[in-house]
Image (cartoon, coloured by chain):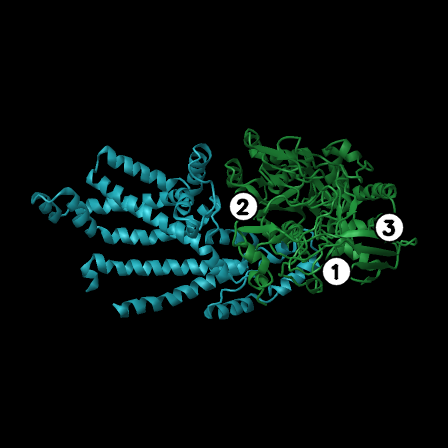
Chain colours: A cyan, B green
Amino acid sequence: MTGTILRRLLSMLPVMGIVAICVFLLLHLAPGDPASIIAGENATPENIARIRTQLGLDQPVWKQFLVWLVALVQGDLGTSMFWGDPVSSLIAQRAEPTVSLAITTLLVAVFLAISIGVLAAAKAGSWIDRLVMGFAVLGFSVPVFVVGYVLIFVFAINLKWLPVQGYSPIADGLVLWLRNLVLPSVALGMAYVALIARITRTTMLDVLAEDYMRTARAKGVATRSMLFRHALKNAAVPIATIIGNGIALLIGGVVITETVFNIPGIGRLVVDAIARRDYPIIQGVIMVFSGVYVLVNLLVDLSYTLFDPRVRG
Amino acid sequence: MRTGMAAAGAAAAPAILSAQTRPPASRTIRTVMHGDIPTYDPIWTTANMSAYHGAMVYDQLFGVDDKLQPQPQMVSKYGVSDDQLTWTFELRDGLKFSDGTSVTAADAAASIRRWAVRSGTGQLMLQRLKDISAKDDKTFVVSLKERFPLLLDGFSSPSTPVLFVMRKKEAETDPMQKIDTIIGSGPFVMNQAETRAGSQYIYDKNPNYNPRSEPASASAGGKVVKVDRVIFQNMPDSQTAVAALQAGEIDFYEIPPIDLLDQIQTDPNINLINLADLGTVGYIGLNWLHPPFDNKLLRQSLLYIVNQEEMMKPTFVDRKWYAACGGWMTCGSPMENDANTGWFKGGPNLAKARELMKAGGYDGRPVVVLQATNIPYMMNAATVFAQQLRAAGYNVQLAPMDWANVVQRRANKGAPDQGGWNVFFTSSGGLSNANPYMIGGMATTGDKGWFGWPSDAKNEELRTKWINAPTLAERQAVGRELQENAWDIVPHMYYGQWRQPAAHRKNVTGWLKVPEAIPLWNVSKT
């Protein structure tokens, strides 16, 4: 097992290397000039050129890439061109809101999606099934920002139950923390719930049609036990896979959700950085997000061994 | 160089201590300004948000009153010699930096020197400067080689870069190098412990600030802080910002979208307020280096094509927020005049435009228009502009891109089909555009000048004449000459002038009007 984990961890290296090359080249070959933005609208071309030199942007792209790569290998993500702060500390400052949003979304979405997916499979063909599938289509089709604005309008502006925007650190109190996360988590979780619920339903239908399930039913096993102890466990591998793949969806959604709900997380950090071409921040965040995605997929792969003994062999 | 917040933190002990106690909401003003603070050095950049930050933590030697006249702020008294070449300034008592040290004349002199290198007015002063020196702790002298009537206008100007007074230690930094230490003598102290760059910037009342006794008037008079804390929240999504204002989560929103004003006006808890009478001017840059607008007749043809009303309306909808302006300098400013504006008074005239196009030998080559799609007023103006030019017979190619791309591409002097351009859109503060020297876009110094690189010796002579004119009446007379010439050579054009209303909760009052700045002193919350 340890050998497997080590081999998989080592296999991450070339993946991250390719990500690094792509991220750097895409950013630096795309148009846009951070020096002009830093200098301000009334700056003279000479001032802009001086700032460009100070930032090292007048160097050849290959040279800039080497400098960045050497620092990256040493664990240095660089320094923000605008604020002068290390990218790693900016990411660290913004990590709590993003991790909080991702975890609450993940927990609520997985719990809700598996529940309604199992229910839809158990009641296949009924109005409950159609309702769940209708919700799944809607949840997957409506963009996160539309859901977000509707939630803000209903629950924050009209009903005044929850705040419009912002984030309250967990250190300031659990209730405040949760109040600020309810609407963004629901908005972000919609597509995720839809995705997992559909896969859960489909996989459960396959499992429920198996002979051993019919046998269990004939032996009088209680429905709840049959669904959750026997069927769900056997349906778990595809569900775990889709949860892992859905992390990419979640990461993309975090960027939009943090903007709509003004959550000072890593998503907002990168959106703002893109608008002004703060290359080190964009590169650093994408490397971190890519690392998380690759790690999550590794964990998903490892989780197969828990659900399916055949994989261990 | 490892700089930024970490380096600045060491110098911010008072701010860190004050971070331990958070003032109540009733003593805190939460604002959403038009953008994020790109850097904390308001001299190094001309970005307005850095000047907003500067106005919080630094003070000025002079401010402007509500009639835009210079008035002493950090200075207690000043005088000028009979030959107008020696200016003597004395600082008022009780001025302290946030690190507890006193503000001295040496700090002021060093700050003037650093500012002057980066400022248009400052550079004019440097050309005439013999020396700036501190006579004692409170007195400094500016000695000139020749008269410079704009000295106090420059010292007091709220247009970026603003002359903020820093400690000598920071002010002696190369003006081309950014400083990150934030120690000023302004009405607020930045709370660096709680500030999160890119998210929220926190300013606490400066307990050591000693305001003037006169009532506040624009950036002059007493800067009395009536709350304990001001927060600049960076909230790029305008829908969210409006919702937050309606829910009372923020107190002030500088740029509510015009299309949401109806929604805001129905809220009984929110007021709209115009904080900048001169507003903003829409600027159309024309490339003089390449055809077709290297040709004077073809530039003149644009005067008879461009319809500012049509370019403004899609964005600003209601005429109370925008106006067409035929002036070379900002309409509503003392320099507004009607010299050589027959083209404007007569409205668009496509027949005349076509005559000029024919006389100028327009050959149907594409006109490349850079269109910033992430700035709605520029995007809309460019779309309408393109259609107006097409109607006249120009072959227009819109080049849609984001603003970061526009600012890069407009620096390209190459031909339009080789990465260059013919037309770009930007905007300028109404105050900056109310004179011929504040922004680079008013100069015609050829390829050493601002983007578009217009070249005209007469305009340069007149600009110098304007700068040296000792009275307002004489400046106005030169202003007419400048405009007469400008609408003949057409170095650039305008797509209108607008006033962006700000929105605030009704329980937050005391807002002061300062062009191109949002002062947070004098503002109280009930």
Q: Earlier in the sequence, mark 2 or mark 1?
A: 1
Residues packed near mark 1 inside 10 Å, few (<14), some (14 to 19) or many (20 plus): many
Residue B361 in view: no
Q: Quadrant of residue B278?
A: top right
SS under mark 3 = helix
Q: Which mark is residue B468?
A: 3
CA separation, marks 3 and 2? 43 Å
Residue B323 versus residue B33 in the image, above or below: above
SS under mark 2 = loop
Residue B183 location, x and y as percent? Answer: 65, 58
Chain letter behind tag 2: B
Q: Quarter holding the C terminus of chain A?
A: bottom left
Give the residue type that dot 1 points to: Thr
Q: Earlier in the sequence, mark 1 or mark 3?
A: 1
Q: Which mark is residue A252?
A: none
Specify whether B61 is left or right of B507. right
